[in-house]
Amino acid sequence: MSSVPVIAQTAGKGAARAAARKRGGGFGPERRPRWLTYTILAVVFVISIFPLYYTLLLGSSDQVSISRSVIPQWLPDASIFGKFGDIISSDAFNFPRALTNSIIISVVTSISVVLFSTLAGFAFAKLRFKGRRGLLVFVIATTAVPTQLGVIPLYIITTQLGWNDKIIAVIVPALVSAFGVFWMTQYLESALPFELIEAARVDGASMIRTFWSIALPAARPAAAMLALFTFIQQWTNFFWPSIVLSQDNATLPVVVKLLQGNYHTDYSLVMAGVFLTTVPLILVFLVAGRQLVAGIMQGAVKG
């Protein structure tokens, strides 16, 4: 299909304008977004960012203002930095250790889930062995089991291993994800042709070499999204760390819970803690967001 400049040179400017209007009303890479598209995007953006902005407003306010009005103020002020300092230097918990624990748990589990899920996904998607489909269905079915049902046996095991109040008790149960296995299996089934695997085998590559050189680069877009999902999930995980870790060796979500008093709760301080624990996630997305989107688009084009 000829582009608009080519039509302008061959058929004149009138034909070029008609072609531009025709393409603008259809679909395709040359279609220009209209005001309705930008309006919808703006509404979605406002709805998505409002909870975080509202948290920032409450964190910048005080308890008296919050009790008087649902929206105590419209713009945040610098008082929230003082509350950040109070949270970081609090004697009720060790905030630097909580931050370190959250980083270690999130990074280690993200790497482990991506590696094991890609290995399992490669096996389920491209290897043929007896019971493959039944085993995959069993793995997927485990996602229907609530996490709360396994807490008691998991706590007994960690107690017998002497892992109570250690971050290894949080890391080990999260090293493998059934959702990650399903995610990578579905992606590799369509993104990795059998011809590439056969060519690698003909060249004498072992199965591990084939996985490392062929399957892993092909799975990079899906692996990046899985790593981001896992990082967010472990960063915001509260249930299991609140059971197995003490307040002196906690994670950031547990620290936010400790900001609530037994008889009195300063909601402005709690909201400041919520915003403070969310800032690292925002930074991770800002740093890795462009690379993630580029990887996804690259994988979509290759697929």
Image: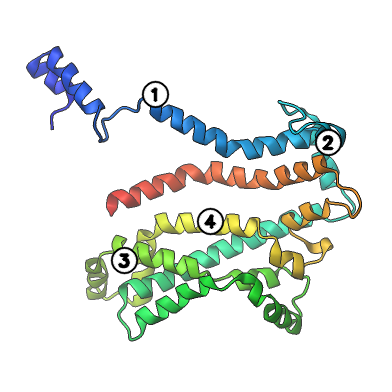
Determine which residue is flagged by label 1: 35
Residue 189 shows which numbered tag? 3
Residue 67 shows which numbered tag? 2
Question: Which percent across, then down, holds residue 80?
Answer: 79, 35
Residue 229 shows which numbered tag? 4
For label 2, count other residues whose C-alpha is less than 10 Å away and answer few (under 14), some (14-19) or many (20+). few
Is the N terminus in the top left, top right, bottom left or bottom right quadrant? top left
What is the residue that sits farthest to the top in this orientation?
Answer: 13
Q: Amino acid at mark 1?
A: Trp
Q: Residue at x 51, y 75 (%)?
A: 142
273 shown above or below 166: above
Q: Is residue 115 visible?
A: no
Question: Mark 2 or mark 4, which is nearer to you?
Answer: 2
Question: Mark 1 or mark 2, which is nearer to you?
Answer: 2
Query: SS class of the residue under badge 3?
Result: helix
Question: Which percent across, then down, holds residue 56?
Answer: 71, 36
Is the C terminus in the top left, top right, bottom left or bottom right quadrant? bottom left
Q: Residue at x 55, y 41 (%)?
A: 286
Q: Amino acid at mark 3?
A: Glu
